[in-house]
Image: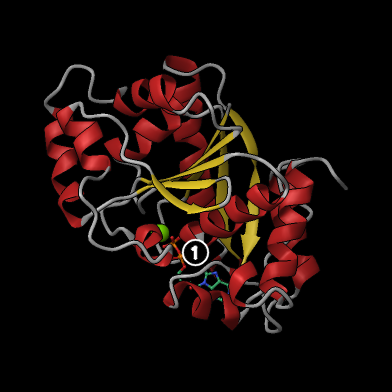
């Protein structure tokens, strides 16, 4: 089982979009995949078209209940979130094992999956730390238009702390550049990040593509919504790169 935490403490960079579409691509490739919505905003849950849930990740993290799993597509499941998950931060901070709840839950109940992708909130608080402790690797999503090497360094430093103190096995899956458009010089952008983080940046970049936005608004993934779009091409390419198929 490979557990990938998808992180960046900045919001709106493409984390949720990447979790949803990369997970679907992995499922298309025959992998059994679990998506975990680890964000109280529940954007991933909504993007998957899931409504009226009976239980959510809150119940696992704060009430010790088993993982609620909603089937989304063939070989693709989701652990949904809801707004009440906002209260989890405070609750978990008061618990001695509050940082290890996700690790415990996944170890116990997600063994059958080839891949678990965790969608993190735009912060480096206890929910993200739970994901970093549960994961074997991180995928850092970087929005190309607002590239901030300083912001990236903050994440890298936190990951280093987690590696040193709590999770020595945590690796970097890679840095993913998203929302590339014509106003940005693709090569220059990629080169800047690649110079700072040699061998860490995915060759695949995700272009700006309105179909990605439309798909999530329609409660669908990009392959169902428009399999000929740039978004579908890019996420399929990313999947192949992760699976070393290219
Ligand atoms: N490559 C892209 N091109 C165009 N819009 C995108 C792209 N990636 C994400 N978006 C849109 O940008 C917004 C923020 O993306 P999201 O994945 O929710 O970011 P995060 O989870 O980091 O907050 C959403 O409306 C999403 O549909
Ligand atoms: Mg999100």
Above/below status of 4 relative to 80: above
Residue located at (50% from left, 23% from top): 111
Residue 41 drawn at (x, y percent):
28, 59
Split into quadrants, the picture shows ligand 2 in the one at bottom left
Above/below status of 245 relative to 122: above
Decide which of 229, 151 is in the foreground and name it: 229
Q: Is mark 1 within 8 Å of ligand 1?
A: yes
Residue 130 drawn at (x, y percent):
35, 31
**Is 73 situated left or right of 41 in this image?**
right
The answer to which image quadrant residue 174 occupies is top right
Residue located at (60% from left, 70% from top): 224
Decide which of 39, 214 is in the foreground and name it: 214
The answer to which image quadrant residue 97 occupies is top left
Circle 1 sits on which residue? Answer: 13
**Is 138 situated left or right of 243 in this image?**
left
**Is 179 situated left or right of 165 in this image?**
right
Quadrant including the N terminus: top right
Decide which of 56, 128 is in the foreground and name it: 56
Residue located at (60% from left, 39% from top): 32
Disc 1 secondary structure class:
loop
**Is 152 situated left or right of 208 in this image?**
left
Above/below status of 239 relative to 101: below
Residue 185 drawn at (x, y percent):
75, 75
Residue 8 drawn at (x, y percent):
46, 51
């Amino acid at each position: 089982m490979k557990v990938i935490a998808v992180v960046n403490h900045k919001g709106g960079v493409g984390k949720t979009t990447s979790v949803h579409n990369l997970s679907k691509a992995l499922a298309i490739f025959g992998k059994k995949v679990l998506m975990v919505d680890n964000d109280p905003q529940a954007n991933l849950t909504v993007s998957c078209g899931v409504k009226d849930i009976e239980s959510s990740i809150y119940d696992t993290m704060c009430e010790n209940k088993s993982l609620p799993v909603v089937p989304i597509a063939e070989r693709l499941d989701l652990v949904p979130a809801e707004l009440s998950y906002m209260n989890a931060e405070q609750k978990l901070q008061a618990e001695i094992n509050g940082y290890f709840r996700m690790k415990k839950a996944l170890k116990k109940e997600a063994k059958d999956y080839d891949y678990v992708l965790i969608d993190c909130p735009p912060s480096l608080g206890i929910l993200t730390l739970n994901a970093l402790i549960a994961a074997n690797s991180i995928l850092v999503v970087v929005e190309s238009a607002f590239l901030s090497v300083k912001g990236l360094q903050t994440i890298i430093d936190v990951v280093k702390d987690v590696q040193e103190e709590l999770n020595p096995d945590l690796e970097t899956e890679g840095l993913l550049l998203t929302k590339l458009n014509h106003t940005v010089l693709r090569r220059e952008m990629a080169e800047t990040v690649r110079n700072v983080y040699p061998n860490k940046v995915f060759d695949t970049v995700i272009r700006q593509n309105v179909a990605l936005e439309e798909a999530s608004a329609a409660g669908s993934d990009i392959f169902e919504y428009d399999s000929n779009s740039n978004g579908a091409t890019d996420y399929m390419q990313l999947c192949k790169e992760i699976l070393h198929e290219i």
